[in-house]
Amino acid sequence: MVIRRIYQITNDYEKGLDHQIHELIRMGLERFNLDIGILSLIDGNTYLVRNVVCPESVPLNAGDSFSYDLSYCWVTLEADGPIAIENVGETELLGNHPAYKEFGLESYIGIPIRVNNKVQGTLNFTSPEPYPRKFREIDIDSLCLMASWLEVEFARKLQQEELENLNAKLEALVRSDPLTGLPNRRHLFEHIDSRINNLSRKASKGAMVLLDLDHFKQINDTFGHQFGDKVLEGVGNALKTVLRNYDFVGRYGGEEFLLWLEDVDVEQVERVCKRIQLSLNAIEAGSKPVTASMGICYFAFDGKERVNPERVIANLVSRADRMLYQAKSSGRNRFESIDSDTLLQEPA
Ligand SMILES: Nc1nc2c(ncn2[C@@H]2O[C@H](COP(=O)(O)OP(=O)(O)OP(=O)(O)O)[C@@H](O)[C@H]2O)c(=O)[nH]1
């Protein structure tokens, strides 16, 4: 009967692990003819009820926690395996123990749950009544089977979480520039694409800024490539610090960065650019301060007409780039700006 029920429970995976555990505990209660079934988690001296099935009259809920010393589980963990007691009050181990005095549970059958060789908690079934017969080997076998099922499921869940964490780290690596930690070009354009989709549905405005460090080749040539890398790192940090949380900045390539500023007017953008100039000046690069030239392209959506994000991006980049070129050719360490053209909005 146990094997058949475990097979059914395993097949019920779509209902979720908590439902499966609930069913497993219900099966144990029926199998042993006991009242209270608990899957506990033990962390230091805390005994946490992870899942419980018990009569309504018993005030016990998932999430309740007790002191581990005040539970019967220390006996199970000390036994390092399954343990079955028909009449707790008559045992030397628990008869005088505060846990027995507190809960008065007489029948107890429990087993440690280990995941990756580490004890995680216990599965236990109890009742305030003494057990009417001796626990048998087949009872212990059933308990071991239930524990194995839980251990396999927990190990699998852990593996799945590790895999998800690893995937998240990988995803972050694929999206960020290793030198500055800023979003890389790919992430930058994914972000801008989705923001344009969003922003263009309402009346909105903002600016794209292309920033290119001045005479960076000279810094590399004079102090070496490694020093150049340090300067780029410093520039990345300066940009992160200067911008507001909802602005977005990424490494566009080499010594070029792209800023995406939303809900800003000309005055605010110019203020940001001046703050950037000041914080770049503070970066050490020989006797000369680090400076940058910037090309700004302002945009505005009326929220009425559809836009093609790719086309909008191409338009903004090309105009910001033209302004950057103008800033470079008119002496560097400055910014030039332009408005986007009417191509941003287009009839459907
Ligand atoms: N250290 C370092 N240097 C880089 C990196 N990426 C690009 N560069 C260097 O950046 C320099 C860019 O040089 P140029 O395109 O001539 O531009 P510039 O010297 O900044 O001159 P202007 O832009 O005209 O002011 C080159 O020497 C590149 O090797 C990087 O990741 N690390």
Image (cartoon, rainbow, N blue to C red):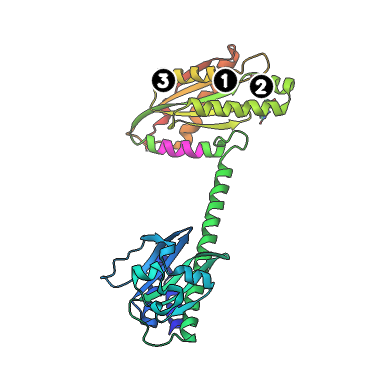
Q: Residues within 10 Å of mark 3 (few under 14, many from 20)?
A: few
Q: Is residue 283 visible?
A: yes
Task: Judge depth for marks 1 and 2 and give the one in front.
Answer: 1
Q: Residues within 10 Å of mark 1 (few under 14, many from 20)?
A: many
Where residue 292 sits, quadrant-wise, is top right
- Outermost top residue: 331
Residue 191 within the magenta-colored segment of the rendering? yes
Location of residue 132 with respect to 79 vertically, above or below: below
Name which of mark 1 and mark 2 comes first in the sequence.
2
* Position of residue 91 measured from the top left corner of the image (x, y, whole percent): 43, 78
Q: Which mark is residue 268?
A: 3
Name which of mark 3 and mark 2 comes first in the sequence.
2
Task: Report helix, strand or loop for mark 2.
Answer: helix
Do labels 1 and 2 touch, CB within 8 Å? no
Instruction: Give the CA distance from mark 3 to mark 2.
Output: 27 Å
Q: Identify the residue under disc 1.
A: 280
In the rendered structure, the answer to whether residue 136 lies left or right of residue 117 reads left
Please state the total of marks drawn on the protein image: 3
Residue 252 within the magenta-colored segment of the rendering? no
Q: Is residue 28 visible?
A: no
- Quadrant location of the C terminus in the rendered image: top left
